[in-house]
């Protein structure tokens, strides 16, 4: 009986600590939002060239998708993630692929920012062969610099 009680107390303490940590992280995010700052993003759009870039030295953890239309319920076209499994397994079966960064795309492939569409950025995936595919990236996934 004592062992069961100790186990319950340990689990309760662990869960309480986890909830406090989650609450603290949420509060920090809300504080940043009130201060007018955004969370650090891994992706950037170059103001001059309009090229979408995720550098290979990005240290932030991230996962975001490009969608067929400017709506998260539509087909996932491309995935960028810091998670090895997401990229290796292409878990969302994205037709344009899954990558850690834009340097991992096929040679000659690039992504060009075309403009805003609501809460999304309209992107053009240009393959080395010249084939173009339009997709939409949530504006929260990148910054324009």
Image (tube, grey):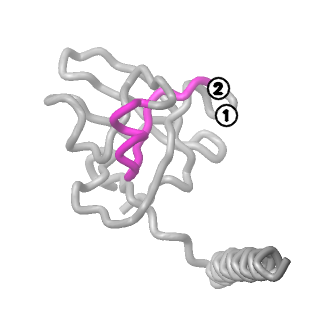
Identify which residue is drawn at 80% across, 74% down. 4
Identify which residue is drawn at 79% across, 77% down. 12
Q: Is residue 106 left or right of residue 47?
A: left
Q: Is residue 19 magenta?
A: no
Can residue 56 be seen in the rendering of this structure?
A: yes
Q: Residue 134, relative to residue 104: is it above or below? A: above
Q: Residue 114, relative to residue 141: is it above or below? A: above
Identify which residue is drawn at 33% across, 35% down. 88
Res 32 label? none
The image quadrant where one finds the N terminus is bottom right
Q: Is residue 22 left or right of residue 2?
A: left
Q: Which residues are magenta?
A: 74-90
Snapshot quadrant of residue 80: top left
The image shows residue 44 at horizontal and vertical percentages of 36, 56
The answer to the question of whether label 2 and label 1 lie on touching residues, with beta carbons closer than 8 A, is: yes
Residue identifier under label 1: 71
Of the pair 89 and 143, the residue shown nearer to us: 89
Residue identifier under label 2: 74
Give the crowd class for mark 1: few <14, some 14-19, many >=20 residues within 10 Å.
some
The image quadrant where one finds the C terminus is bottom left
């Amino acid at each position: 009986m004592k062992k069961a009680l100790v186990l319950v107390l340990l689990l309760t303490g662990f869960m309480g600590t986890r909830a406090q940590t989650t609450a603290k992280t949420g509060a920090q995010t809300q504080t940043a939002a009130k201060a007018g700052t955004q969370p650090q993003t891994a992706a950037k759009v170059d103001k001059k060239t309009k090229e979408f870039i995720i550098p290979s030295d990005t240290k932030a953890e991230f996962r975001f998708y490009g969608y067929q239309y400017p709506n998260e319920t539509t087909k996932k076209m491309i995935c960028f993630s810091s998670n090895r499994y997401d990229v290796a397994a292409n878990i969302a079966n994205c037709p344009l692929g899954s990558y850690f960064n834009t340097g991992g795309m096929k040679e000659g492939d690039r992504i060009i920012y075309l403009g805003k569409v609501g809460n999304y950025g309209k992107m053009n995936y240009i393959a080395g062969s010249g084939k173009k595919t339009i997709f939409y990236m949530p504006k929260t996934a990148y910054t324009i610099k």
